Image (cartoon, rainbow, N blue to C red):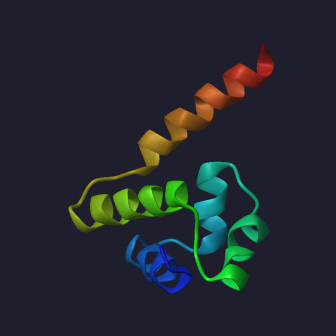
């Protein structure tokens, strides 16, 4: 996905790059660095496409991503 389209979908989802990165447990710079190459990896493209569609259709995506974060925290404790 072109970085410009990625940014458009971030806005459509009502997020900033920083917020998106935090939801995924990433550093914002890891995402903004893709601006240099002009494209984002397919896994980020899929995630933002789903999130922006969910937002557009009135679904709250935060509980889903928070649940994933809980799983990750539990995994790191083990």
> Toward which corner of the image does residue 19 lie, by quadrant?
bottom right
Residue 45 image point, x, y percent = 47, 63
Please, is residue 73 above or below residue 25 in the view? above
Q: Total marks drawn? A: 0
Residue at the location (36% across, 66% down)?
Answer: 52
Determine whether, in the image, residue 6 is placed left or right of residue 13: right
Residue 3 image point, x, y percent = 55, 80
Residue at the location (29% across, 63% down)?
Answer: 53
> Toward which corner of the image does residue 48 lie, by quadrant?
bottom left
> Toward which corner of the image does residue 73 lie, by quadrant?
top right
Please, is residue 1 above or below residue 38 in the view? above
Q: Quadrant of the C terminus?
A: top right
For this orientation, the residue located farthest to the left is: 57
Residue at the location (53% across, 59% down)?
Answer: 44
Determine whether, in the image, residue 55 is placed left or right of residue 40: left
Determine whether, in the image, residue 26 is placed left or right of residue 19: right
Q: Nearer the viewer, residue 61 or 43?
A: 43
Residue 72 image point, x, y percent = 66, 30
For this orientation, the residue located farthest to the top is: 78
Please, is residue 50 above or below residue 34 in the view? above
């Amino acid at each position: 996905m072109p970085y410009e389209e990625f940014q458009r979908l971030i806005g459509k989802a009502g997020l900033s790059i920083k917020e998106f990165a935090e939801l995924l447990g990433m550093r914002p710079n890891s995402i903004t660095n893709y601006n240099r190459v002009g494209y984002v990896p397919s896994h980020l493209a899929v995630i933002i496409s789903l999130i922006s569609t969910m937002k557009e259709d009135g679904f709250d995506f935060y509980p889903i991503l928070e649940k994933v974060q809980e799983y990750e925290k539990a995994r790191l404790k083990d």
